């Protein structure tokens, strides 16, 4: 019951409380009034019937004295106008029925008088009273009254109470529906304000304070809370805006820095390209004139001279390859990638085919454990990546049984990770970063097949242009694994 | 039934007149026991003026003429009524009637009824007769028989003249109420 009441709106609750309280109190009071009235009325009726009986007792004395039942009956009959009396009887002093009168034919009389007094039976009020003459008891008078009067009285009172109950209910309803606004009004207004605040996220709304009681205090507290929230909200807003401003500022700075960096990179690339391109021209002249010298003047030179010329030739050739590498590297920064779907298996197969003789000579076993995926990339550049890594793996290996493994693994957090693994000489940890520096060689110029030292630098550049990453794991003397990723996202498109 | 009663009443009267003395006396004894009780009971429903009691302690029932009670009146003597003790006195003449509160006039005095009534006129004496038409002659209460039942008639005019107040309850029981005091017109 109370639980169901929880869902009732507050103004109905208040009215219900008023009605129930009024109704309960009225019902109790009404019942008490009826009860006490009935009790009092019953006593009155008993007294009344007793004194009525006494009147008849008095008028019956002569009839009893002179043994005149006929007259006695006539006397008793005179009760008839009093409609509540249904039976009246006179008993002589021996207890014999002396005279009687009944309103209806079927009325019965007690065969002998009962004890003096009046009392209620189930359906009647009866009175036995002594008939006295000069303190001598002549007999007993008996009166029986029906309870119609009592029932009428109870009914009338019940009706009255019922009417009062109804009228009070209506008045209570009207009053409570008017007065409940004192309480429900501010609460509903407060609830409405709270809803508006939470729906619109507008903390500038204020509840209207109408009273100075606890509800007024509640409204004040609510408004105070709104004040605080509004203040914090605006502080937060300001902080957010300041932060955004700072982020924008930083972004602008970064963009500017990046722009500058790109610019300088480009300038560097341009410089490297122009420098190397322009350097090639005089180098070719030096080379050509050196070969002219060897061809035309070798007979005029002694051995030492010829040897120095040979060295000059060798140095110019080396210089040329260095410049070629530099050109290749600088071109990577200038040229756009031709991104397309690339089947890596084809790429790797081609490379292994072209290296087949070298692999055989060096007794290197190359293996691809499972097919490689299809990625979006620049076909030629990706080929360069694999070529350089495979060649490196072949070169830096002094084992009797050499092997290279080319594979990949899926990476749930990003693009697949490719790797090229060997069982070669390995790279000490302190050089893991240095191997990617241009023209950086860890070994003697002609050791492990020579080279310019630009390969890994170019590989890293290609990978970075594909927005990928390269790193390595190695332990000296046991082998090296180069890992790399290509463009982020779904590479198997 | 009505026819029978109409035919029966004169026959009954005739039978009473011709009744054998023995049979009559048996009935009479019972009748006068009742009448004695009535005399005593009348006192309870009658108020005399206070000055009518020379001896406030006693209430005198005087029997004038032949005593028909045969001793049954003696049984009520000594009873208390309204603070007075009943006394029964027999007398032959009307000379000393002044002290009586109740005067029973026997049938034997039927010839002198007029003189007796005249003698007690103005005195607070309850005259009680035992003879037909006595009430009309000015006797206050007169016994009559209704069948075998003793009843009485009351002359309220005489009672008023005597200064005696008779309770309405007693009047209620009277078979007949006579309002004219004294003798019947034309008597």
Image (spheres, coloured by chain):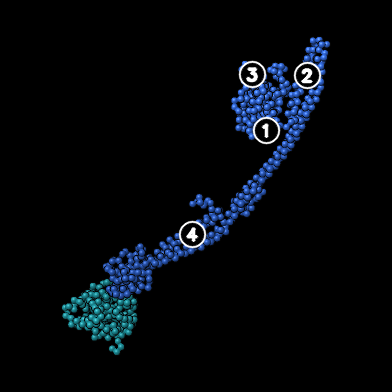
Chain colours: A blue, B cyan
Q: Mark 2 lies on which chain?
A: A
Q: Identify the residue position indicated by label 1 in the image.
A: A340
Q: Identify the residue position indicated by label 2 in the image.
A: A316
Q: Identify the residue position indicated by label 3 in the image.
A: A360
Q: Which residue is drawn at 28% across and 74% down?
A: A68
Q: Distance between the residues labelled 3 and 1?
A: 33 Å
Which tag is nearer the camera, tag 1 or tag 2?
Answer: 1
Closer to the chain start, of discs 1 and 2, is 2
Label number found at residue A26 = 4
Q: Residue furthest bottom?
A: B186
Residue A140 picture quarter: bottom left
Q: How far apart are marks 3 and 2 (CA)?
A: 32 Å
The residue closer to the viewer here, A191 or A386, is: A386
Asked if residue A11 lies left or right of residue A224, the reply is: left
Q: Residue at x 63, y 50 (%)?
A: A196
Closer to the chain start, of discs 4 and 1, is 4
Query: For the residues tagged 4 and 2, is the chain the same?
Result: yes
Residue A73 picture quarter: bottom left
């Amino acid at each position: 019951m109370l639980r169901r009441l929880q869902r009732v709106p507050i103004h109905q609750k208040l009215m219900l409380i008023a009605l129930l309280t009024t109704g309960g109190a009225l019902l109790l009071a009404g019942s008490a009034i009826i009860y006490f009235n009935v009790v009092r009325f019953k006593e009155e009726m008993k007294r009344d019937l007793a004194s009525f009986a006494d009147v008849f007792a008095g008028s019956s004395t002569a009839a009893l004295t002179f043994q005149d039942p006929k007259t006695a009956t006539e006397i008793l009959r005179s009760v008839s106008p009093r409609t509540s009396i249904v039976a009246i009887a006179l008993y002589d002093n021996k207890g014999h029925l002396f005279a009687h009168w009944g309103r209806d034919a079927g009325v019965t009389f007690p065969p002998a008088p009962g004890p003096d007094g009046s009392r209620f039976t189930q359906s009647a009020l009866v009175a036995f009273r002594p008939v006295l003459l000069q303190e001598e008891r002549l007999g007993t008078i008996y009166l029986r009254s029906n309870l119609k009067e009592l029932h009428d009285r109870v009914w009338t009172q019940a009706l009255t109470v019922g009417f009062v109950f109804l009228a009070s209910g209506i008045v209570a309803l009207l009053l409570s529906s008017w007065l409940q606004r004192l309480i429900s009004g501010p609460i509903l207004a407060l609830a409405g304000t709270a809803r508006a605040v939470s729906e619109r996220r507008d903390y500038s709304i204020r509840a209207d304070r109408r009273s100075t009681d606890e509800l007024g205090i509640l409204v004040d507290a609510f408004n105070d809370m709104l004040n605080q929230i509004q203040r914090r909200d605006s502080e937060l807003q300001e902080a957010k805006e300041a932060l955004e401003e700072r982020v924008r500022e930083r972004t602008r700075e970064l963009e500017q820095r990046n722009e500058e960096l790109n610019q300088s990179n480009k300038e560097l690339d341009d410089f490297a390209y122009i420098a190397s391109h322009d350097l090639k021209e005089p180098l070719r002249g030096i080379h050509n004139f050196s070969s002219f010298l060897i061809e035309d003047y070798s007979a005029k030179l002694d051995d030492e001279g010829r040897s120095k010329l040979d060295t000059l030739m060798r140095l110019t050739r080396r210089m040329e390859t260095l410049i070629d590498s530099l050109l290749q590297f600088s071109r990577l920064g200038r040229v756009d990638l031709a991104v397309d779907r690339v089947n890596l298996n084809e790429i790797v197969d081609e490379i292994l085919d072209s290296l087949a003789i070298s692999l055989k000579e060096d007794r290197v076993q190359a293996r691809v454990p499972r097919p490689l995926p299809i990625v979006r990339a620049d076909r030629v550049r990706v080929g360069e990546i694999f070529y350089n890594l495979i060649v490196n793996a072949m070169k830096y290996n002094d084992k009797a049984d050499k092997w290279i493994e080319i594979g990949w693994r899926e990476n749930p957090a990003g693009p697949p990770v490719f790797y090229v693994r060997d069982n070669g000489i390995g790279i000490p940890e302190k050089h893991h970063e240095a191997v990617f520096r241009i023209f950086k060689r860890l070994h003697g110029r002609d050791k492990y097949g020579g080279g310019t030292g630009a390969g890994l630098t170019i590989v890293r550049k290609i990978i970075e242009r594909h927005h990928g990453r390269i790193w390595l794991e190695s332990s000296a003397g046991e082998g090296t694994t180069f890992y790399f990723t290509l463009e982020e996202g779904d590479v198997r498109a | 039934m009505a026819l029978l009663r109409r035919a029966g009443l004169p026959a009954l009267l005739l039978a009473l007149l011709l009744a054998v003395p023995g049979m009559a006396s048996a009935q009479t004894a019972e009748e006068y026991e009742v009448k004695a009780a009535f005399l005593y009971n009348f006192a309870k429903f009658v108020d005399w003026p206070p000055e009518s009691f020379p001896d406030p302690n006693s209430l005198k029932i005087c029997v004038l003429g032949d005593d028909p009670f045969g001793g049954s009146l003696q049984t009520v003597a000594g009873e208390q009524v309204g603070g007075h003790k009943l006394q029964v006195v027999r007398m032959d003449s009307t000379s000393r009637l002044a002290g009586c509160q109740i005067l029973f006039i026997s049938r034997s005095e039927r010839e002198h009824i007029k003189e007796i009534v005249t003698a007690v006129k103005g005195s607070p004496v309850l005259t009680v007769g035992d003879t037909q038409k006595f009430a009309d002659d000015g006797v206050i209460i007169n016994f009559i028989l209704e069948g075998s039942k003793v009843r009485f008639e009351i002359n309220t005019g005489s009672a008023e003249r005597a200064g005696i107040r008779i309770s309405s309850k007693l009047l209620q029981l009277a078979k007949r109420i006579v309002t004219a005091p004294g003798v019947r017109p034309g008597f």
